[in-house]
Image (tube, rainbow, N blue to C red):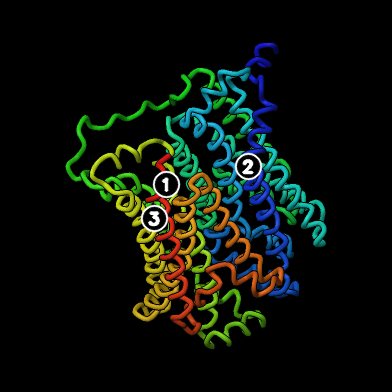
């Protein structure tokens, strides 16, 4: 016991330090995700108010393999069960938030050299990892409790609400433990994040493959995935409480392995040895754009592949989604406003392309912040010591934020348009319209890039926080602004509010031109600020 106490010495102060550093972002993602279940439940209640309508909705869902792959199985036609089904994929955000939290306060701290400084004080070897897991587990439990309380207040059964909230909590805890293990494998935080996110994505693919298989297929694949476990808890539909034992087992095994590896490896090292590069650089790396491509190509390729897969799924399920919703009077009204018989598909694509625009802004923000990462890690200074201006160096990375966003959205639009066109029989028409709906999101994405670059140039220490905070605010406004009936002035603060709802809506060049002008002005201000300030 004394040895264990020594290993965990200083855990309390480290927990307080993590909470101090994440005092804004941690409560933000907890509150945003906790509001989603009530919001979705209220939307489903408005669209399908009667039991017969919900049963018809469920019948179409269960008969469609594509919808089963995208959202998983629905286990009941009541409002709570349908809400849990609709959020089956959204639980990925819970796992993403917790795994990023753990890696940020473990492997990233080691890579930055701050873990070594803390280790020189009265801090046990395992305290840093244990503190990160305590915060991640606590945040997951807080999220689950808030979601459950919100559903109970909304009027849903207590048992189902508790099962749903607990399923989200244990899912977040499971991927916090996965991240703790990934943090011991490699020497870099970027690689650790990549491993943990890849496991998260593989878990989703296994669940999707199992749920889409149907009877006679490999439905057992869903049982290999925490996504499948979450859905098979079956909130609001004869809950299966024993499934939480699977989550507990996964957490215990992954956390135990993480602590065992952490105790045996050297500080700053990983289970996998670092791969040494060539003694001499390739001739094509002689300019900053080529170097930026070398650094950013992995992220661009991965994001493009993800957008392509989502686009294919989106386009493939559109016809089924239209069939599901065509009996709803509320959606029919929206469809008539957007163009008659094609309006249902237009509503579907407009909603998802708006969501993809927000996700693409996440990629663009990350690509922009690579400038700050290169500067903070000391790699920018050697580049700038050569015959490379600051503007040229910054522009090499901004190309991936600006053009890269166009690439990922274009890939999504092409994939979705082609998949939908093949099912509708009019590829040339549908491909063009869906691609336009994706590309029109770009000016709003570029505004987010502009804000990040402006902060990097003027207030570099606040660039990461400010860029992600602005994006989070846009997500809040876009996803919750109208359901919460916020004022028009507040809704207009989001650049995405000024993007036309294509396909189906009229296009005005003026708001798009203003967005491009604002983005260009912000980027110019950031480059001017970079030129005048010291490189940190």
- Residue that badge 2 annotates: 22
Residue 500 image point, x, y percent: 50, 77
The residue shown at (77%, 53%) is 161
Residue 59 image point, x, y percent: 63, 69
Residue 12 image point, x, y percent: 70, 27
- Residue that badge 1 annotates: 533
Q: Residue furthest front?
A: 532
The reply to whether discs 3 and 2 touch (Cβ–Cβ < 8 Å) is: no
Give the secondary structure at mark 3: helix
The reply to whether discs 1 and 3 touch (Cβ–Cβ < 8 Å) is: no
> Split into 4 quadrants, where in the image is the N terminus?
top right
> Split into 4 quadrants, where in the image is the C terminus?
top left
In this rendering, does residue 424 appear at all?
yes
Label 1, label 3: how far apart the Cα atoms are: 10 Å
- Residue that badge 3 annotates: 527
Left or right of 348: which side holds 429?
left
Q: Which mark is residue 165?
A: none
Q: Residue furthest left?
A: 283
Residue 65 image point, x, y percent: 52, 63
Give the secondary structure at mark 2: loop
Position of 61 relative to 162 (above/below): below
Position of 468 relative to 416 (above/below): above
């Amino acid at each position: 016991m004394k040895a264990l106490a020594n290993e965990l010495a200083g855990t309390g102060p480290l927990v307080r330090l993590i909470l101090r550093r994440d005092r804004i972002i941690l409560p933000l993602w907890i509150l945003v995700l906790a509001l989603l279940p009530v919001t979705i439940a209220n939307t489903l209640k408005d669209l399908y108010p009667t039991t017969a309508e919900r049963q018809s909705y469920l019948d179409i869902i269960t008969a469609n393999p594509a919808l089963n792959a995208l959202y998983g199985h629905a286990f009941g036609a009541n409002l709570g069960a349908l809400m849990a089904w609709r959020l089956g994929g959204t639980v990925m955000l819970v796992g993403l938030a917790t795994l990023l939290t753990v890696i940020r306060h473990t492997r990233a701290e080691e890579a930055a050299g701050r873990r070594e400084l803390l280790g020189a004080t009265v801090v046990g070897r395992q305290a840093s990892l244990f503190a990160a897991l305590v915060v991640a587990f606590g945040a997951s439990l807080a999220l689950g409790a808030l979601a459950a309380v919100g559903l109970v207040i909304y009027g849903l059964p207590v048992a189902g609400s508790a099962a749903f909230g607990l399923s989200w909590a244990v899912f977040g805890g499971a991927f916090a433990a996965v991240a703790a293990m990934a943090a011991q494998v490699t020497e870099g935080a970027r690689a650790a994040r990549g491993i943990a996110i890849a496991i998260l994505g593989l878990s989703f693919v296994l669940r999707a493959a199992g749920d889409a298989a149907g009877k006679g297929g490999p439905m057992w694949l869903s049982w290999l995935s925490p996504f499948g476990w979450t859905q098979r808890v079956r909130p609001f539909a004869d809950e299966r409480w024993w499934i939480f034992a699977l989550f507990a087992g996964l957490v215990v095994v992954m956390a135990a392995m993480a602590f065992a590896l952490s105790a045996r490896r050297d500080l700053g090292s990983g289970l996998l040895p670092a791969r040494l590069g060539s003694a001499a650089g390739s001739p094509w790396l002689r300019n900053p754009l080529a170097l930026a491509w070398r650094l950013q190509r992995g992220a661009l390729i991965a994001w493009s592949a993800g957008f392509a897969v989502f686009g294919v799924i989106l386009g493939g399920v559109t016809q089924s989604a239209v069939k599901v919703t065509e009996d709803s009077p509320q959606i029919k009204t929206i469809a008539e406003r957007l163009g008659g018989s094609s309006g249902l598909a237009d509503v579907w694509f407009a909603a998802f392309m708006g969501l993809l625009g927000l996700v693409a802004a996440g990629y663009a923000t990350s690509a922009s912040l690579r400038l700050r990462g290169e500067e903070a890690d000391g790699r920018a200074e050697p580049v700038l010591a050569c015959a490379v201006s600051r503007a040229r160096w910054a522009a090499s990375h901004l190309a991936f934020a600006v053009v890269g966003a166009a690439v990922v959205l274009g890939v999504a639009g092409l994939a979705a348009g082609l998949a939908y066109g093949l099912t509708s029989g009019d590829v040339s028409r549908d491909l063009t319209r869906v691609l336009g709906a994706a590309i029109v999101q770009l000016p709003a994405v570029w505004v987010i890039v502009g804000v990040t670059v402006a902060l990097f140039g003027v207030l570099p220490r606040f660039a990461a926080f400010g860029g992600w905070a602005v994006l989070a605010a846009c997500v809040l406004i876009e996803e919750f602004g109208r359901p919460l009936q916020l004022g028009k002035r507040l809704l207009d603060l989001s650049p995405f509010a000024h993007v036309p709802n294509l396909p189906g809506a009229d296009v005005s060049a003026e708001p798009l031109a203003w967005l491009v002008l604002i983005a260009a002005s912000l980027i110019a201000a950031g480059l001017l600020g970079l030129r005048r300030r010291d490189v940190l």
